[in-house]
Image (tube, coloured by chain):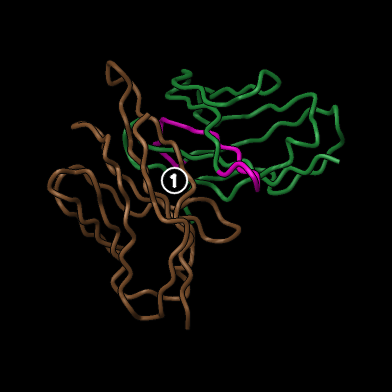
Chain colours: A brown, B green
Amino acid sequence: DAKTTQPNSMESNEEEPVHLPCNHSTISGTDYIHWYRQLPSQGPEYVIHGLTSNVNNRMASLAIAEDRKSSTLILHRATLRDAAVYYCILRVPNSGGSNYKLTFGKGTLLTVNP
Amino acid sequence: DSGVTQTPKHLITATGQRVTLRCSPRSGDLSVYWYQQSLDQGLQFLIQYYNGEERAKGNILERFSAQQFPDLHSELNLSSLELGDSALYFCASSVRINTEAFFGQGTRLTVV
């Protein structure tokens, strides 16, 4: 399986931007980059995904390197409610494209200081 | 609210027993996933169904089984329960197999 590497933890201050990095050097051309987060005592929550181009939605932005070997999730203004574990996942098709795995790693624990 | 409903929210049972966890996916979602999350293992993928058919299997024990019914709801059956099966069990659903998944709030299983 294509793997991702994330820092175990990061800290940020409230109302400041946060850049969460993810390395995926073995990514292949058909792998989508997905980000999920898990708030304490809740199920994982979809944040954003992309393939090649940078993506924006109401929650965050996803910046994808030109070679696609890394990506960065950007929270533009962190709030206390953004404190969570953030997972960077490669959504990889099986041979034949009939299925796509969604495999979680350990993620990055983001702490937001008031 | 993700639109995925899991019942029950909490379950306490004894070793050796059997339990059934239920998941109702978001309206229109054809794919259902089950995950187990324990403190030391993180989120472990168990199994995935798409429109009633099993599509992928992860680290699912032989004592565990699942199915997706014609109305698209899914059940995860856990039998001969052991203390180590105590965990949060999450269900997720997606429209298709390659789109974003939406997770329920989980069922917390405690085996005593």
Image quadrant of residue B65?
top right
Measured as percent of width and height from the top left, residue A84 is found at: 49, 62
Q: How many marks overall? A: 1
Q: If the image is split into quadrants, where does the N terminus of chain A sit?
A: top left
Q: Is residue A99 left or right of residue A11?
A: left
Q: Is residue A33 above or below residue B66?
A: below
Instruction: Indicate whether residue B40 is drawn in magenta.
Output: yes
Q: Is residue A111 above or below residue A70?
A: below
Q: Where does the magenta region start and end?
A: B26-42
Measured as percent of width and height from the top left, residue B100 is found at: 35, 42
Q: Is residue B106 above or below residue B67?
A: below
| Residue placed most toward the observer, B47 or A86 | A86
Measured as percent of width and height from the top left, residue A114 is found at: 47, 83
**Disc 1 crowd, CA 10 A, few/some/many (<14, 14-19, 20+):** many
Q: What residue is disc 1 on?
A: B102
Q: Is residue A66 left or right of residue A30?
A: left
Measured as percent of width and height from the top left, residue B52 is found at: 48, 20
| Residue placed most toward the observer, B84 or B71 | B84
Residue drawn at x 66%, y 43% is B7
Residue occupying the far bottom of the picture: A114
Residue drawn at x 69%, y 47% is B108
Q: Is residue B7 left or right of residue A109?
A: right
Residue drawn at x 80%, y 31% is B82
Image quadrant of residue A28?
top left
| Mark 1 element type | strand
Q: Label 1 marks which chain's residue?
A: B
| Residue placed most toward the observer, B7 or A10 | A10
Instruction: Indicate whether residue B57 is drawn in magenta.
Output: no
Q: Amino acid at mark 1?
A: Phe
